[in-house]
Image (spheres, coloured by chain):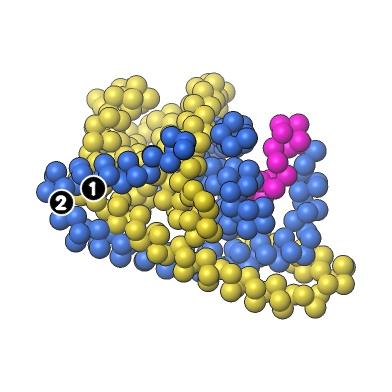
Chain colours: A yellow, B blue
């Protein structure tokens, strides 16, 4: 999918330049683009390293476990009966969300895959997603991240006057997405048997 | 002074204090984390550069303006600024693409403009749905995905609208 989009962005761009008779600017656009990307990446790597250091401290001081504890009750409500059917699945789901919330996405994906495999082991129809799986996917896709470190780092790299002032709006917007995802899940699960 | 100014320093203070209380070797662990940070920037570097390359040609040729003009009648109804339209389209499809678009919007309209901020909030609000779907369902060979894509897309649209209106409230 992204291959097609990437390809068309360039082709359509070049054709537009040709039609407008601006094609001599192509070389300038290309080299400017590469140069600006490198400038941004250098600015980004410094601040990103700082945030990753912070996140490591969170991880080591047991904040992920704390988040997991806080998530335990809401997850029991969202996945009713799962703790009796497969305790490991619930555990993996909670760890996936806890690591996601702390912005440790590299750590989150293995937990997510583990959770899916555990859910598959109690799935009666192996080629069809169970209600648990769909719910997990939606919760995962709209998981609140308390510190969107990459976004903050890029904003800092682009010299924002206050790179982190998007934290509260981001949490509100994500919560809205989560709630609408869960409501549509409840309504649609009856239709998509 | 607005309250948000205190959020970040407080978070940093909290993280450091809790770590110290739990007897974490703060300096050494921080260094280890910083290593991961460099590595992750190193990893996203080629993706970001590749996406920005395509986006720059698309934007600077004027093709982006055509796309925005084409879609803006719909987004006008919801009072969504034209500048953030590309973000709404790309976000479910590609994480690095969205990162590129966010950067491009911040550079075009200003990082602290309303467009720049809305794009940043959208970036943090939902995951890359198609990617998540293919990884997780691919891992256990699920073929009938039922309403998961539709529900996730509904969440994405609502999240985007929320991003727009929350930013209007916060920054206007």
Residue B155 marker: none
Left or right: where does residue A154 sit relative to residue B31? right
Q: What secondary structure predominates along the stretch shown in magenta?
A: helix
Residue A137, given in percent of the width and then of the height, sits at 44, 37
Q: Is residue B80 magenta?
A: yes
Residue at 22%, 39% (x, y): give it: A65
Part of the protein shown in magenta: B74-87
Percent x, y of residue B118 = 59, 42
Vertical side of A10 occupied by B73: above or below: above
Q: Residue at x 30, y 30 (%)?
A: A71
Crowd around label 2: few <14 · some 14–19 · many ≥20 (10 Å)? some
Which circle marks residue B24 in the picture?
2
Q: Is residue A92 visible to the viewer in this orientation of the structure?
A: no
Which one is earlier in the sequence, the residue at label 1 or at label 2? 1
- The kind of secondary structure element at disc 2 is loop
- The subunit carrying tag 1 is B
Q: Residue furthest left?
A: B23
Q: What residue is disc 1 on?
A: B16
Vertical placement of residue B9 versus A10, above or below: above
């Amino acid at each position: 999918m992204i291959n097609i989009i990437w390809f068309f962005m360039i082709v359509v761009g070049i054709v537009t330049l040709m039609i407008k008779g601006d094609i001599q600017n192509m070389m300038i656009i290309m080299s400017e683009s590469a140069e600006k990307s490198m400038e941004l990446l250098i600015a980004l790597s410094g601040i990103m390293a700082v945030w990753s250091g912070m996140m490591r401290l969170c991880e080591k001081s047991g904040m992920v476990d704390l988040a997991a504890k806080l998530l335990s009750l809401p997850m029991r409500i969202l996945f009713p009966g799962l703790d009796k059917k497969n305790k490991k699945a619930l555990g993996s789901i909670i760890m996936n969300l806890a690591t996601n919330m702390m912005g440790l996405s590299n750590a989150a994906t293995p937990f997510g895959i583990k959770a899916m495999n555990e859910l598959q082991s109690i799935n009666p129809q192996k080629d069809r997603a169970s209600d648990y799986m769909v719910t997990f996917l939606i919760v995962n896709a709209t998981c609140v991240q308390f510190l969107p470190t990459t976004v903050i780092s890029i904003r800092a790299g682009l010299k924002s006057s206050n790179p982190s002032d998007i934290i509260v709006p981001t949490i509100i917007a994500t919560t809205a997405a989560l709630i609408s995802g869960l409501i549509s899940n409840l309504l649609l699960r009856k239709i998509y048997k | 002074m607005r309250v948000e100014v205190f959020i970040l320093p407080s978070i940093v203070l909290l993280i450091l204090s809790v770590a110290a209380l739990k007897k974490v070797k703060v300096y050494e662990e921080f260094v280890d984390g910083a290593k991961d940070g460099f590595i992750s920037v190193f990893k996203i570097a080629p993706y970001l550069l590749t996406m920005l390359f395509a986006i720059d040609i698309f934007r600077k040729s004027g093709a982006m303006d055509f796309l925005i003009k084409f879609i803006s009648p719909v987004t006008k109804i919801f009072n969504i600024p034209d500048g953030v339209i590309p973000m709404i389209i790309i976000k479910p499809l590609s994480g690095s693409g969205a990162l590129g678009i966010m950067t491009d919007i911040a550079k075009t309209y200003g990082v602290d403009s309303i467009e720049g901020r809305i794009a940043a909030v959208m970036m943090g609000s939902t995951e890359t749905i198609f990617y998540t779907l293919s990884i997780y369902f691919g891992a256990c060979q699920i073929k009938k995905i039922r309403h998961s894509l539709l529900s996730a897309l509904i969440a994405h649209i609502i999240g985007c609208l929320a991003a727009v209106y929350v930013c209007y409230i916060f920054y206007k």
